[in-house]
């Protein structure tokens, strides 16, 4: 009987340092951090404020590049790519859900969800059809034409979850996804992320300081002073 081929990491950090310069002072936010995240994992990155977990999120999400070390996405070294190249990779591979929702205030729900598809060159009719499908899926069929200010916090985060799925990414990166929500709305959003993980085999990476949310994850990465502990 053939042995199962070992999975390769979808994201790998090798001895990653991120050093910020403040005048003549160097402030290391990440200190030689290594991490492997495999396809279809649900990973919680946890740590107190100032631990470096937000910087780590920026590395994992291709939002920034390291000062030293290497980052691989699907075995491609992205450590020194230009921002335009990183943006294209992000658009295809990673969907984002932020604590502050990050919706465009002047756009209705359909337009917010369709926006990431615009940058991938998807035709308008197809964008709108998919946006309606995704919003219906997250329970917002009756909120398609509402702007963010006309929606509750929980509804705005549902729009953000739908937007994160616009380009059918392999990875969903959720940064404190329940931080601005009441208990019920927070639970609804976490259940949606859990469902995406279990039913669609999405890789979920969640950055949080909330210990209660760690129960949703299959792997916990604890960060302190820019290092894994």
Image (tube, helix red, strand yellow):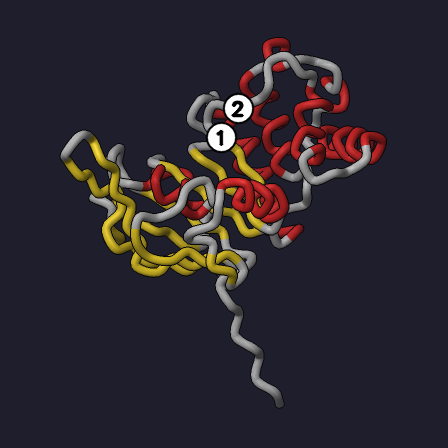
Q: CA distance from mark 2 to mark 1?
A: 7 Å
> In screen coordinates, is 50 left or right of 95?
left
Write down the quadrant of residue 143 in the picture: top right
The foreground one among 9 and 183 is: 9
Q: Residue at x 47, y 59 (%)?
A: 77
As rendered, which of 80 and 159 lies closer to the eye? Answer: 80
Q: Is residue 42 above or below residue 156?
A: below
Q: Residue farthest to the right?
A: 125
- Name the residue at 19% across, 38% down: 27
Which residue extends farthest left?
24
User: What residue does disc 1 label?
Assistant: 98
- The quarter of the displayed image where residue 107 is located: top right
Q: Which residue is at a point 71% across and 23% down the rendered structure image?
A: 111
CB within 8 Å, label 2 to label 1: yes
Of residues 97 and 126, the one nearer the viewer is 126
Q: Secondary structure at mark 1?
A: strand
Q: Secondary structure at mark 2?
A: loop
Could you tell whether 111 is left or right of 195 in the image?
right
Residue 15 point in image, percent of width and height: 30, 59
Q: Residue 39 location, x and y as percent?
A: 54, 59
Q: Residue at x 54, y 60 (%)?
A: 74
Q: Quadrant of the N terminus?
A: bottom right
Please state the horizontal and vertical placement of residue 5, each as a whole percent of the image. Answer: 56, 77
What x and y, as percent, mark residue 138? 68, 31
* Label ID, residue 6: none
Which mark is drawn over residue 102? 2
Decide: is 3 above or below 87: below
Q: Mark 1, residues whose alpha carbon is within 10 Å: few (<14), some, or many (≥20)?
A: many
């Amino acid at each position: 009987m053939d042995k199962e081929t070992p999975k390769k990491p979808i994201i790998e950090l090798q001895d990653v340092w991120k050093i910020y310069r403040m005048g003549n002072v160097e402030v290391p936010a990440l200190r030689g951090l290594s991490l492997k995240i495999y396809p279809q994992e649900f990973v919680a990155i946890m740590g107190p404020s100032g631990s470096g977990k937000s910087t780590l999120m920026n590395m994992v999400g291709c939002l920034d590049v390291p000062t030293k070390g290497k980052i691989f996405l699907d075995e491609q070294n992205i450590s020194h790519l230009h921002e335009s190249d990183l943006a294209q990779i992000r658009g295809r591979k990673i969907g984002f859900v932020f604590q502050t929702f990050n919706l465009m205030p002047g756009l209705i729900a359909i337009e917010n969800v369709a926006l990431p598809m615009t940058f991938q060159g998807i035709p308008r009719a197809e964008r709108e059809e998919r946006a309606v499908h995704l919003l219906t899926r997250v329970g917002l069929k009756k909120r398609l034409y509402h702007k963010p200010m006309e929606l509750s916090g929980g509804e705005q985060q549902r729009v953000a979850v739908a937007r994160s799925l616009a380009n059918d990414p392999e990875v969903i990166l959720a940064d404190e996804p329940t931080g601005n929500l009441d208990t019920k709305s927070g639970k609804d959003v976490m259940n949606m992320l859990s469902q995406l993980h279990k039913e669609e085999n999405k890789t979920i990476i969640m950055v949080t300081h909330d210990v209660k949310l760690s129960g949703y994850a299959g792997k916990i990465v604890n960060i302190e002073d820019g290092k894994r502990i």
